[in-house]
Image (spheres, grey):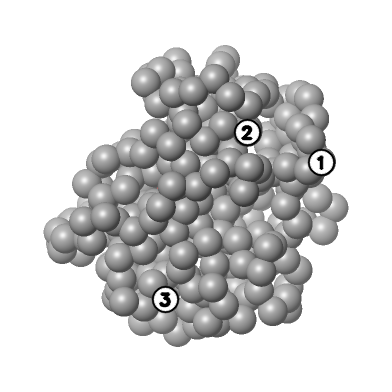
Amino acid sequence: MRGSLTRALTGALGLIAAAAGQLATAAPVAADSVVVGGRQAQITDAPWVVALSSRDRFGGTRAGQFCGGVLVAPTKVLTAAHCLGREVLGGEPWEVRDFVVIAGRAALRGQGGQEVRISDTWVNPDYDPTTNSGDLAVLTLVSALPQSYVIGVARTGDAAYTPGTEADVYGWGDTTGSGTYASALRTARVQVLPDGACERAYPGGFGVPYRGDTMLCAGDPRGGKDACQGDSGGPLVAKGLLVGLVSWGSGCGQAENPGVYTRVSAVLPESF
Ligand code: 4AZ
Protein backbone atom coordinates (compact mmCIF):
# COMPACT_ATOMS: atom_id res chain seq x y z
CA MET A 1 0.00 0.00 0.00
CA ARG A 2 2.78 2.39 0.80
CA GLY A 3 6.06 0.70 0.00
CA SER A 4 8.13 -0.65 2.81
CA LEU A 5 7.97 2.27 5.17
CA THR A 6 6.15 1.94 8.40
CA ARG A 7 3.09 3.74 9.63
CA ALA A 8 5.21 5.55 12.13
CA LEU A 9 6.81 7.48 9.36
CA THR A 10 3.90 9.44 8.05
CA GLY A 11 3.86 12.27 10.52
CA ALA A 12 5.49 15.65 10.66
CA LEU A 13 8.96 14.11 10.91
CA GLY A 14 8.23 11.95 7.91
CA LEU A 15 11.21 12.73 5.76
CA ILE A 16 13.85 12.40 8.43
CA ALA A 17 12.16 9.40 9.97
CA ALA A 18 11.74 7.79 6.56
CA ALA A 19 15.48 7.76 6.07
CA ALA A 20 15.98 6.13 9.45
CA GLY A 21 13.18 3.65 8.74
CA GLN A 22 14.63 2.58 5.45
CA LEU A 23 17.88 1.71 7.16
CA ALA A 24 15.90 -0.27 9.70
CA THR A 25 13.95 -2.15 7.04
CA ALA A 26 17.03 -2.97 4.98
CA ALA A 27 17.80 -5.98 7.18
CA PRO A 28 16.36 -9.19 5.74
CA VAL A 29 13.40 -10.81 7.42
CA ALA A 30 12.88 -14.53 7.71
CA ALA A 31 12.20 -16.13 4.34
CA ASP A 32 8.99 -17.90 5.33
CA SER A 33 8.12 -15.06 7.10
CA VAL A 34 2.36 -13.05 8.35
CA VAL A 35 1.74 -11.73 8.28
CA VAL A 36 5.66 -12.51 8.35
CA GLY A 37 6.59 -15.97 9.72
CA GLY A 38 3.01 -17.16 9.76
CA ARG A 39 0.88 -19.93 8.42
CA GLN A 40 -2.42 -20.12 6.60
CA ALA A 41 -5.51 -19.67 8.74
CA GLN A 42 -9.01 -21.11 8.32
CA ILE A 43 -11.75 -18.49 8.45
CA THR A 44 -13.90 -20.91 10.45
CA ASP A 45 -11.26 -20.80 13.20
CA ALA A 46 -11.18 -16.99 13.15
CA PRO A 47 -14.57 -15.84 11.81
CA TRP A 48 -14.14 -12.42 13.44
CA VAL A 49 -11.33 -11.48 11.04
CA VAL A 50 -12.56 -9.27 8.19
CA ALA A 51 -10.94 -7.52 5.27
CA LEU A 52 -11.58 -3.86 4.43
CA SER A 53 -11.97 -3.48 0.69
CA SER A 54 -12.38 -1.02 -2.13
CA ARG A 55 -11.79 -2.45 -5.57
CA ASP A 56 -12.13 1.02 -7.08
CA ARG A 57 -9.20 2.31 -5.08
CA PHE A 58 -7.01 -0.76 -4.58
CA GLY A 59 -7.78 -2.90 -7.61
CA GLY A 60 -9.66 -6.15 -7.92
CA THR A 61 -6.95 -8.80 -7.96
CA ARG A 62 -7.00 -9.20 -4.17
CA ALA A 63 -10.68 -8.18 -3.86
CA GLY A 64 -9.63 -4.63 -3.05
CA GLN A 65 -8.21 -5.61 0.37
CA PHE A 66 -6.25 -2.80 2.01
CA CYS A 67 -6.55 -3.33 5.77
CA GLY A 68 -7.84 -5.80 8.30
CA GLY A 69 -10.61 -5.47 10.85
CA VAL A 70 -12.33 -7.44 13.57
CA LEU A 71 -16.00 -8.04 14.32
CA VAL A 72 -16.85 -7.16 17.95
CA ALA A 73 -20.66 -7.08 17.55
CA PRO A 74 -22.86 -8.23 14.63
CA THR A 75 -22.77 -4.76 13.05
CA LYS A 76 -19.52 -3.36 14.53
CA VAL A 77 -16.03 -3.75 13.09
CA LEU A 78 -12.94 -2.36 14.76
CA THR A 79 -10.04 -1.30 12.60
CA ALA A 80 -7.10 1.09 12.77
CA ALA A 81 -7.97 4.78 12.43
CA HIS A 82 -5.04 5.18 10.06
CA CYS A 83 -6.77 2.78 7.64
CA LEU A 84 -9.44 5.46 7.11
CA GLY A 85 -7.01 8.33 6.59
CA ARG A 86 -7.13 10.54 3.55
CA GLU A 87 -3.74 9.32 2.38
CA VAL A 88 -5.06 5.74 2.35
CA LEU A 89 -8.57 6.25 0.97
CA GLY A 90 -7.93 9.36 -1.12
CA GLY A 91 -10.91 11.03 0.55
CA GLU A 92 -13.36 10.55 3.35
CA PRO A 93 -14.62 7.00 3.99
CA TRP A 94 -18.15 7.84 2.78
CA GLU A 95 -16.70 9.08 -0.50
CA VAL A 96 -15.36 5.60 -1.26
CA ARG A 97 -18.46 4.31 -3.02
CA ASP A 98 -17.57 0.61 -2.99
CA PHE A 99 -16.11 0.46 0.53
CA VAL A 100 -17.11 -2.94 1.96
CA VAL A 101 -16.16 -5.30 4.75
CA ILE A 102 -15.53 -8.85 3.57
CA ALA A 103 -16.43 -11.44 6.21
CA GLY A 104 -16.36 -15.22 6.18
CA ARG A 105 -13.77 -15.41 3.42
CA ALA A 106 -10.11 -16.39 3.80
CA ALA A 107 -9.22 -16.55 0.09
CA LEU A 108 -9.54 -13.05 -1.32
CA ARG A 109 -10.00 -14.37 -4.86
CA GLY A 110 -12.79 -16.70 -3.73
CA GLN A 111 -16.51 -16.13 -3.56
CA GLY A 112 -17.14 -17.27 0.00
CA GLY A 113 -18.59 -15.26 2.81
CA GLN A 114 -20.27 -11.91 2.48
CA GLU A 115 -19.47 -8.38 1.45
CA VAL A 116 -21.25 -5.86 3.63
CA ARG A 117 -21.50 -2.11 3.13
CA ILE A 118 -20.78 0.41 5.83
CA SER A 119 -23.41 2.82 7.12
CA ASP A 120 -21.27 4.78 9.56
CA THR A 121 -17.65 5.31 10.55
CA TRP A 122 -16.40 6.57 13.89
CA VAL A 123 -12.77 7.58 14.25
CA ASN A 124 -11.45 7.85 17.80
CA PRO A 125 -11.37 11.61 18.42
CA ASP A 126 -8.17 11.13 20.45
CA TYR A 127 -6.39 9.46 17.52
CA ASP A 128 -3.21 11.38 16.75
CA PRO A 129 -2.05 10.73 13.16
CA THR A 130 1.39 12.12 13.95
CA THR A 131 2.15 9.69 16.76
CA ASN A 132 -0.39 6.94 15.93
CA SER A 133 -1.67 7.11 19.51
CA GLY A 134 -5.27 5.89 19.83
CA ASP A 135 -5.24 4.20 16.40
CA LEU A 136 -8.81 2.87 16.41
CA ALA A 137 -11.97 3.35 14.37
CA VAL A 138 -15.36 1.65 14.43
CA LEU A 139 -17.30 0.77 11.27
CA THR A 140 -21.05 0.16 11.49
CA LEU A 141 -22.32 -2.38 8.97
CA VAL A 142 -25.60 -1.93 7.10
CA SER A 143 -26.61 -5.50 7.91
CA ALA A 144 -25.74 -7.82 10.78
CA LEU A 145 -23.26 -10.66 10.52
CA PRO A 146 -23.86 -13.79 12.60
CA GLN A 147 -23.34 -13.42 16.35
CA SER A 148 -21.18 -16.56 16.10
CA TYR A 149 -18.57 -14.52 14.18
CA VAL A 150 -18.13 -12.04 17.03
CA ILE A 151 -15.06 -12.04 19.31
CA GLY A 152 -15.01 -10.71 22.87
CA VAL A 153 -12.82 -7.79 23.81
CA ALA A 154 -10.38 -8.15 26.73
CA ARG A 155 -10.95 -5.53 29.39
CA THR A 156 -8.26 -3.50 31.08
CA GLY A 157 -6.43 -5.68 33.56
CA ASP A 158 -7.35 -8.95 31.82
CA ALA A 159 -4.64 -11.60 32.07
CA ALA A 160 -4.53 -11.61 28.26
CA TYR A 161 -2.47 -8.40 28.51
CA THR A 162 0.19 -9.94 30.76
CA PRO A 163 3.63 -9.91 29.12
CA GLY A 164 4.63 -13.38 28.00
CA THR A 165 1.08 -14.32 27.00
CA GLU A 166 0.93 -16.03 23.60
CA ALA A 167 -1.05 -14.10 21.02
CA ASP A 168 -2.05 -14.60 17.41
CA VAL A 169 -2.12 -11.89 14.78
CA TYR A 170 -4.13 -12.27 11.57
CA GLY A 171 -4.04 -10.62 8.19
CA TRP A 172 -3.67 -10.56 4.43
CA GLY A 173 -0.62 -8.31 4.52
CA ASP A 174 2.94 -8.54 3.31
CA THR A 175 4.46 -11.96 4.03
CA THR A 176 8.07 -11.04 3.36
CA GLY A 177 8.53 -7.38 4.28
CA SER A 178 9.15 -6.60 0.63
CA GLY A 179 5.68 -6.26 -0.84
CA THR A 180 4.46 -9.85 -1.28
CA TYR A 181 0.83 -9.62 -0.25
CA ALA A 182 -1.06 -12.71 0.83
CA SER A 183 -4.15 -13.75 -1.09
CA ALA A 184 -5.32 -16.02 1.71
CA LEU A 185 -5.62 -15.22 5.40
CA ARG A 186 -2.51 -15.85 7.48
CA THR A 187 -1.74 -15.91 11.17
CA ALA A 188 1.42 -15.75 13.25
CA ARG A 189 2.03 -16.63 16.88
CA VAL A 190 3.73 -13.85 18.79
CA GLN A 191 3.72 -12.90 22.45
CA VAL A 192 2.63 -9.89 24.44
CA LEU A 193 5.86 -8.10 25.34
CA PRO A 194 6.57 -5.73 28.21
CA ASP A 195 6.16 -2.05 27.40
CA GLY A 196 9.89 -1.70 27.98
CA ALA A 197 10.67 -3.73 24.87
CA CYS A 198 8.88 -1.19 22.68
CA GLU A 199 10.07 1.78 24.73
CA ARG A 200 13.63 0.68 23.95
CA ALA A 201 12.85 0.09 20.28
CA TYR A 202 10.86 3.29 19.82
CA PRO A 203 12.20 5.90 22.23
CA GLY A 204 11.14 8.85 20.11
CA GLY A 205 13.68 11.29 18.83
CA PHE A 206 13.72 10.65 15.09
CA GLY A 207 10.67 8.40 14.96
CA VAL A 208 7.59 8.53 17.13
CA PRO A 209 7.68 7.18 20.67
CA TYR A 210 5.91 4.07 21.93
CA ARG A 211 3.26 4.90 24.55
CA GLY A 212 2.14 2.06 26.77
CA ASP A 213 -1.08 3.78 27.79
CA THR A 214 -2.63 3.56 24.31
CA MET A 215 -0.36 1.02 22.60
CA LEU A 216 0.50 -2.64 23.12
CA CYS A 217 3.85 -4.22 22.32
CA ALA A 218 3.94 -7.73 20.82
CA GLY A 219 6.31 -9.80 18.77
CA ASP A 220 8.62 -12.73 18.53
CA PRO A 221 11.62 -12.23 20.84
CA ARG A 222 13.74 -14.18 18.31
CA GLY A 223 12.31 -12.27 15.36
CA GLY A 224 10.70 -13.69 12.25
CA LYS A 225 7.04 -13.52 13.23
CA ASP A 226 5.20 -10.22 12.99
CA ALA A 227 2.48 -8.22 11.36
CA CYS A 228 3.46 -6.19 8.31
CA GLN A 229 2.14 -3.78 5.69
CA GLY A 230 -1.48 -4.49 4.84
CA ASP A 231 -2.20 -6.19 8.16
CA SER A 232 -3.09 -2.87 9.77
CA GLY A 233 -6.38 -2.83 11.62
CA GLY A 234 -6.39 -6.60 11.98
CA PRO A 235 -6.70 -8.39 15.30
CA LEU A 236 -4.21 -9.55 17.91
CA VAL A 237 -5.92 -12.25 19.97
CA ALA A 238 -4.78 -13.66 23.31
CA LYS A 239 -6.64 -16.15 25.52
CA GLY A 240 -9.50 -16.06 23.02
CA LEU A 241 -10.04 -12.32 23.41
CA LEU A 242 -9.18 -9.30 21.31
CA VAL A 243 -6.29 -7.35 22.84
CA GLY A 244 -4.82 -5.34 19.97
CA LEU A 245 -5.15 -3.98 16.45
CA VAL A 246 -2.16 -3.96 14.10
CA SER A 247 -0.95 -0.35 14.09
CA TRP A 248 2.72 0.27 13.31
CA GLY A 249 6.34 -0.74 13.75
CA SER A 250 9.71 -0.44 12.12
CA GLY A 251 10.12 -3.10 9.46
CA CYS A 252 8.62 -6.52 9.94
CA GLY A 253 9.87 -9.48 11.92
CA GLN A 254 12.99 -7.94 13.34
CA ALA A 255 13.63 -9.13 16.89
CA GLU A 256 14.76 -5.68 18.01
CA ASN A 257 11.70 -3.90 16.57
CA PRO A 258 8.50 -5.48 17.90
CA GLY A 259 5.08 -4.80 16.43
CA VAL A 260 3.04 -1.99 17.93
CA TYR A 261 -0.69 -2.55 18.36
CA THR A 262 -3.56 -0.36 19.49
CA ARG A 263 -4.31 -1.24 23.13
CA VAL A 264 -7.99 -1.88 22.51
CA SER A 265 -9.06 -1.95 26.18
CA ALA A 266 -7.66 1.53 26.71
CA VAL A 267 -8.92 3.14 23.53
CA LEU A 268 -12.34 1.59 22.85
CA PRO A 269 -15.17 3.53 24.49
CA GLU A 270 -17.24 1.62 27.06
CA SER A 271 -20.39 2.06 24.98
CA PHE A 272 -19.24 -0.25 22.17
C1 4AZ B 1 2.12 -1.01 8.29
O1 4AZ B 1 2.78 -0.22 7.65
C2 4AZ B 1 2.79 -1.81 9.34
N1 4AZ B 1 5.74 -4.88 11.92
C3 4AZ B 1 2.03 -2.62 10.16
C4 4AZ B 1 2.66 -3.37 11.13
C5 4AZ B 1 4.02 -3.29 11.29
C6 4AZ B 1 4.79 -2.49 10.48
C7 4AZ B 1 4.15 -1.75 9.50
C8 4AZ B 1 4.65 -4.11 12.38
O2 4AZ B 1 0.92 -1.13 8.09
Cα–Cα gap, marks 3 and 1: 35 Å
Residue at horizontal 62%, vertical 48%? 46
For marks 3 and 1, give the one nearer the viewer.
1
129 and 186: which is toward the camera? 186
Residue at horizontal 42%, vertical 70%? 219
Q: Is mark 1 within 8 Å of ligand 1?
A: no
- Label 2, residues with CA under 10 Å away: few <14, some 14-19, many ≥20: many
Q: Is residue 252 above or below residue 185?
A: below
Decide if residue 134 is in sight here: yes
How far across and down, in percent of the image, does residue 180 sit? 27, 40
The numbered dot on residue 198 is 3
Q: Is residue 150 left or right of residue 87?
A: right
Cα–Cα gap, marks 3 and 2: 33 Å
Q: Is residue 166 above or below residue 17?
A: below
In which quarter of the view is residue 140 placed?
Answer: top right
Q: Earlier in the sequence, mark 2 or mark 1?
A: 2
How far across and down, in percent of the image, does residue 234 sit? 54, 48
Circle 1: residue type: Gln
Circle 2: residue type: Gly
- Label 1, residues with CA under 10 Å away: few <14, some 14-19, many ≥20: few
- The residue at which mark 1 appears reads as 147
Q: Are marks 2 and 1 in contact (CB under 8 Å)?
A: no
Q: Is residue 174 left or right of residue 211?
A: left
Provide the secondary structure element on which disc 3 rests.
helix
- The residue at which mark 2 appears reads as 104
Cα–Cα gap, marks 2 and 1: 12 Å
Q: Which quarter of the image is occupied by the N terminus?
A: top left
Residue at horizontal 50%, vertical 47%? 41
Q: Is residue 190 above or below residue 117?
A: below
